[in-house]
Structure formats: C-alpha cells, structure tokens
Amino acid sequence: MKSQIIPISFFLLSVSLILIGFIFFNVFYGKKYEEKIVKIRMLDATKNVMENAKNYLKLSLLYSSLQAMRELASSGGSLGSAPWICNGPNPLPFNISKGCLENYTQYYLTIYITKFNTTLPIKIYLTNFSDVIYQLKEADVIKSLHDEGNFSIDAINAKISISGDEIKVYEEFNASEFITKNRFWYMFRIFTEWANEDPFSSCICAHLDCACSSSSGEEYCSSCLQAAERCAEFSLQLLQKKFDEYVVCEKANICCMQGVGNECLNQTDCISWKNKCSKSCEHTCVQPRSAKIESREGSISHSLSSQNKRELTQNSQSDNCKIFNCKTYYWYEARFSAAYSFTCRDYKYFISSPKGPKPLTFSVLAYAYLKDQDRCKTLVKCECPESATKCEECKSKCTPCFGEIKDKCTTTTTTTTIPKCVSNEDCCSDYPGSFVKCVAGVCELCELPSMECHKC
Amino acid sequence: MKSQAEEFFYLASIVFSAIFLIIFLFHQQLKQGEEILQATQERIYNEEVSSIGSILFNSKIPFFEKYYIQAMIDGILEGKDYNFVYYGKALNTTNITQIIETLLEESLRGKWRIEVILPKDVQVYGNLKKERIAYSWENLIPVPDERVGKVVIYIGD
C-alpha cells in the first residue's frame, strides 16, 4: 500500500504542476497578451473609423456644395431671389448668392453628418462644422476668373470624438474642397450682364400702347400677348448670344396682364403698376430650415375689375350753317404686365445629381409691370353747343378745345391755328408717338390704328 | 529489483511531466506566434485596403477631375450602363470599370473586389470570389441628395 502512495502522489504532483503552470501562464501572461491584442485592434479600428469619417465628410462637403449650387441656380442664384429684371435691372447681388450657397451647403452637410454611424462597439460624436466659406471674390467673378470653377470651399472646425472601452480619441477637423469644371459663377456673371442691359422691361414699356384696347382695368393679355412674346423672344436671343455654344436657353411665360386706367392723369413715362402679375423686387435668401421652393408658375385668377371701357364717340355736330371743327386731346392710362422665366442649361460640364450627372440649370425671372398715364392719347372732336362761336366754348376732354368753327352761311371764325400738312408724316412733329393722318391739310389723330393712319 | 522499477517509474513520471509542460508552453508560444502573425497580416491587409479607400476618396480621375468614388456613384445613379459615366460635352464619357481595374490590377492582380451599395442599387467591380476573401473594409458614402450608401473593399490571399 505504502509503495503505491508514493508514485500516485508523485503523479498528482506532476499533474498539478502542469495545471499551475497553465493557470499562471494564462493569468499573468496570456490574459495580458489578449488584452494587448484587443487594445491594438480597437486602436486600429478607431483609427480606421476616424479616417473613414474624414473621407465621408470630405465627400459630403462636395455633394452638399453641388446640391446647394444646383438648387440655388434653378431658383435664380438664391432661394428667395426676386426677378433679375424687375421693371428695370435688378440682378442678384453677389454677396446674397454667395451667402446663400454657404448657408445651404452647411445645412446639407449637417444632414450628412447626422447620418454617419458605425457597426463597431464604439461611440462616435461628430459635431457640425461651425462655418462653410466659399473662397471667391466678386471682382474675380466679374473678371471671369471663376468661369470654370477653380475656387475652394472651406468647412471649418468640426469635431470628431470616438470613445469605447479604455479608448478615447478626439480630433478637430477642417475640410476643404477645390471645385473645378463647374460653371455656376459663369452663368451667374452672364445673367448679371444681361439683367443690367435689361432688354425686357424697356421693350414692354415701348409696347405699352397695346393695352389701349383693353376693356377693363386689369385683364388677361389679349391684344398685348404678342407684344409680350416678342419682348421675351428678343430678350432670350440677347441672352443666348451672351453664352457660349455649350449653353442652351429657353423661356417660359409666367403671366401676362393688361388694362386701362383713369383718363386725363398727369403725363408720365412708364411707371410701376401693381397687379396680379407683379412681384417684389427685393432679393433675399430664405433660411434652409424654412425653405419652401415657391412655385414659379403663379396662378392668376381671372377677374375683371372696374369696367373702364372707353367709348370714344366722335361728336361731329353741325347745324345748317356751322361746321364745328373743334378738337381736344384725350388720353387714358395704359397698363401692361408680363413675366417670363429664362432658363439656361450648361451642357459643357455635368454635375452630380440624384439621377447621375446632369447639366447645371440656371433660371431667373424677368418681370415688367408698367403703366403710362398718357400712353393712349387721341385727338377727339369736342362737343360744342349750337350757340358756340369759339372752340373754347366747347366741352373739352384733357386739354382745352382748339380748332375752328366755320360758318358756311356767313364768314368763317377761326379761333385757333391747327397744324397744316401735306402727308401723314408731316403731322408727327405735332403728335409724336401717336397715330395720325393728314386730312385736307389738317392733321388729325386717329383713335384706333388703321391703314390710313401713320404711327409716329 | 522492485525498488529499481519504482525508481525508474518515478523518473519516467518526472521526465514525462517536464516534457508535457515544455510541450504545453511551446504550444502556447506557437499559438501566440500565430496570433501575432495573424494580427500582422491583418494590419498589412488593413493598410492595403485603407490605401485603396484613400485613393477612392481622395484622388481624382485625371482630366475629368472627379473622385474615383464620385464617378462610381455617378455611374450607378445615371442608371444606364454602370460602367460608363457621361460628364458633358467638354469631358465626354469615362469608363469607370476600366479606370478602377487599371488602378488596382497592377498591385492586387485579381485579388480585389469593390462593392458600391447605394440605397436602390449595388454595383460590383473586380472578380474576387466570396470564398477567397481574406479581409474586408467598409466606409459609409454620402449619396446625392442627402442619402447614404456604403463602399466595401475586399481583398483575397
């Protein structure tokens, strides 16, 4: 029995030695080693996540800026931009467009930042960039230095913080993106030049007399529709000529109104006429959170306002002996309003969009809502009482009556000299801008345009 | 005779135990070495795919001046032929598959595969089969407008 105890205890001693060795190895070396390995791997993973976040943010900055440029370009350079032609030149100021781009780029960038995550057992905190700056100056845009892009967008002061078991990494991060092959500012520059030349509202002003035949104070265009279309076409051609061969422009009618106003008001040039087809001329940038893209196609309900229909009756009175040839100037207000959108697409460089690369589309509005208080001017015969011997005794319109009352039975009484003429053109010096005709050496104003009348 | 046998048995037990312990420790050392090798290999892979990722995100395709990853995303979004992207009259079309292959084939020789996963579509570049994948790396990618996708790079041994 005794002889068996010794080998057994020796065997047990050997086994326990192995077990103790195993335990000691794992406790003091193996575990430590494992922890070290895990820590190294976590560090590697954290480093990767940090680099991945930077890659993600850099590309996000690019996409945010492209989205902002795309959306703002299609809204006239700024969300909330007014018509670039608004009864006169009214191009969007450079600083509003630049500031709006910066706001929207930062806004979209923030959305991308909130979407960054990881499947690793670590926590990531990404704080937004405090500022986004487009590095360009107005003078350089005007000098065509940024026609092809070549400017940088800096996003500054984002903070990336990653924390996990025994790991905490923190970094401040600035992103910069150099934009090339992008013609946002080229289109902005050309549209600015075009708007400053203002071919549209000056054309509308010149064609204001188309509204003289209107039947109310405010109505949909009928006689003025053609004039509006001609002005828009002329403006479009001028715009198209300013761009190179890669840009294609088109126009679309938004609204057109015409009307006539009160009679015998003070004589004016073209002045503003507020109506359903008019718009504020103040440029703004709608803040991203409340941004709602306004519908460009504003619907205009048809309603006739006060009926101001003119019935120009020619009063030609004469008794047996007297011939009344007394005349007076009569005018009333002409109103004409037209609005068009001018959209140009750049086919030279396509830019990234949700449907793949697409041409950059820049669209601006042109509004002209004008009235002229003496545009519809005519010379009409005065209503004279039977007893009148002089034209001054007759009932006048906007000016005192002038002309002559002839007495066939006795003698002729001339009260006022009237223009003498041989041809219709001779009357233009007396009635510039009007339809006139020369009848028997006397200039007469035509109430309505006709073949026998000459437009001065 | 008996005591001699017992002594021999004791001696054999001691030697056996010692050998067992040595083998155990040696085995542990080998295992540790394997782990180190594996970790080192992983690091090599990680460096490799990270550098590919860095190229995709930070290098631009010459002439077109678009990031590689941007061109890949654009190709998928365009929705016609994922291999080609049209960038306008001045730049014309680029073959993104060819460009990526040229970029990676020289160093990885068929041992790579890139998956670009967008919200509605996936495009795979490279011919590495799934059973030969040794390491993978993924990164979130922004997608116009305000969407998110993923790019996964696989390399094989």
Image: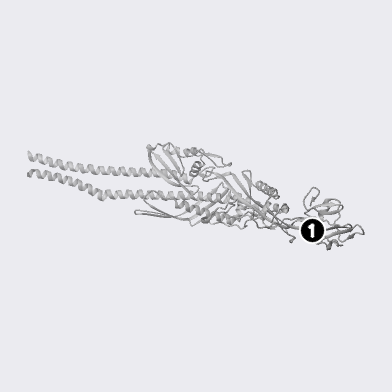
Against A264, is A232 above or below?
above
Q: Please, which chain is the residue tagged with disc 1 on?
A: A
Counting from the top left corner in percent of width and height, residue A324 is at: 85, 58
Amino acid at dot 1: Tyr
Left or right of A80? Residue A452 is right
Residue A360 seen by the camera: yes
Q: Quadrant of residue B21?
A: top left
Q: Nearer the viewer, residue B38 or A212?
A: A212
Counting from the top left corner in percent of width and height, residue A448 is at: 77, 51
For mark 1, what is the residue?
Answer: A329
The residue that appears at 16% across and 45% down in the rendered structure is A14
Q: Residues within 10 Å of mark 1 (few under 14, many from 20)?
A: some
Counting from the top left corner in percent of width and height, residue A317 is at: 84, 57
Residue at the front extreme? Answer: A320
The residue that appears at 29% across and 50% down in the rendered structure is A32
Dot 1: element: strand
Q: Nearer the viewer, residue A310 or A277?
A: A310
Quarter containing the N terminus of chain A: top left
Counting from the top left corner in percent of width and height, residue A20 is at: 20, 48
